[in-house]
C-alpha cells in the first residue's frame, strides 16, 4: 500500500496486490491493482484485475476484470477481458477487449480493430450500451 503522502517512481517486482493512495509513476506486474479515490498511477501495469477509483494514465493490460468506479478515470492504451464502468467513470484512449484471458500477458497489437458491440469516436473505444 502506498499512502496519500507517498510519491513513488520506479518499478515493482511481481506482487499479489498494490493499493495506491498517493502518486505513482511506475512499471507494475501484479495480481491486482487498486488506485483509490485521489490516487494517481502513471506508467505501465500488467495485472490480473484492476479497480480504478482515482486516475490511471498509461498502458493498462488486465487479464481479468477492469472496474472503473464513478470517481475513476483511465486514459491511454487499455486492454481487458471484462470491463465494468460505473456511471461517472471515464475510460478513453486506445481501449479494446482482449481476446485472451491469460493473466494480462497479451501482446498489444499495432492498432485498434473493429469489434461487434463497441462504438468508436475520437479514437476512444468503450462498450456500447445494450
Image: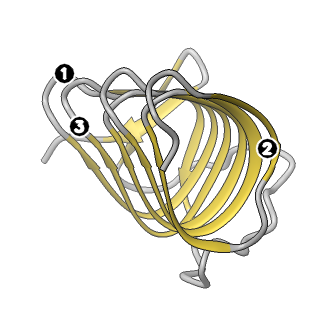
Q: CA distance from mark 1 to mark 3?
A: 8 Å
Q: Mark 2 sits on what residue? A: 111
> Pointer 2: residues within 10 angstroms few (<14), some, or many (20+)?
few
Mark 1 touches mark 2? (CB < 8 Å): no
Q: With respect to residue 102, does 20 lie above or below? A: above
The foreground one among 30 and 7 is 7
- Which of the 4 image quadrants contains residue 129? top left
Q: CA distance from mark 3 to mark 2?
A: 27 Å
Relative to residue 58, is residue 118 drawn left or right?
left
Badge 1 element: loop
Counting every numbered tag in the picture gives 3
Badge 3 element: loop
Q: With respect to residue 101, does 34 lie above or below? A: above
The foreground one among 27 and 127 is 27
Residue placed farthest to the top in the image? 122
> Pointer 1: residues within 10 angstroms few (<14), some, or many (20+)?
few
Is tag 1's residue or tag 2's residue first in the polypeptide sequence?
1
Q: Mark 3 sits on what residue? A: 69
Badge 2 element: loop
Mark 3 touches mark 2? (CB < 8 Å): no
Q: Position of residue 74 (x, y in %)?
A: 48, 30
Please give the name of the residue rendered at 34% of the width and 36% of the height, measured from the top-left corner: 36
> Pointer 3: residues within 10 angstroms few (<14), some, or many (20+)?
many
Please give the name of the residue rendered at 76% of the width and 40% of the height, measured from the top-left corner: 26
Q: Position of residue 19 (x, y in %)?
A: 45, 50
Residue placed farthest to the bottom in the image? 102
Please give the name of the residue rendered at 50% of the width and 55% of the height, measured from the top-left corner: 115
Q: CA distance from mark 1 to mark 2?
A: 27 Å
Relative to residue 70, is residue 92 drawn left or right?
right
Q: Mark 1 sits on what residue? A: 88
Q: With respect to residue 95, does 40 lie above or below? A: above
Amino acid at each position: 500500500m502506498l499512502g496519500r503522502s507517498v510519491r513513488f517512481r520506479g518499478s515493482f517486482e511481481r506482487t499479489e496486490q498494490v493499493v495506491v493512495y498517493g502518486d505513482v509513476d511506475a512499471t507494475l506486474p501484479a495480481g491486482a491493482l487498486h488506485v483509490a479515490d485521489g490516487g494517481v498511477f502513471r506508467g505501465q501495469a500488467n495485472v490480473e484485475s484492476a479497480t480504478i477509483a482515482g486516475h490511471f494514465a498509461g498502458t493498462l493490460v488486465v487479464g481479468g476484470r477492469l472496474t472503473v468506479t464513478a470517481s475513476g478515470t483511465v486514459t491511454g492504451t487499455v486492454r481487458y477481458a471484462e470491463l465494468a464502468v460505473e456511471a461517472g467513470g471515464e475510460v478513453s484512449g486506445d481501449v479494446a477487449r482482449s481476446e485472451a484471458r491469460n493473466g494480462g500477458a497479451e501482446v498489444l497489437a499495432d492498432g485498434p480493430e473493429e469489434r461487434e458491440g463497441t462504438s468508436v469516436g475520437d479514437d476512444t473505444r468503450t462498450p456500447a450500451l445494450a
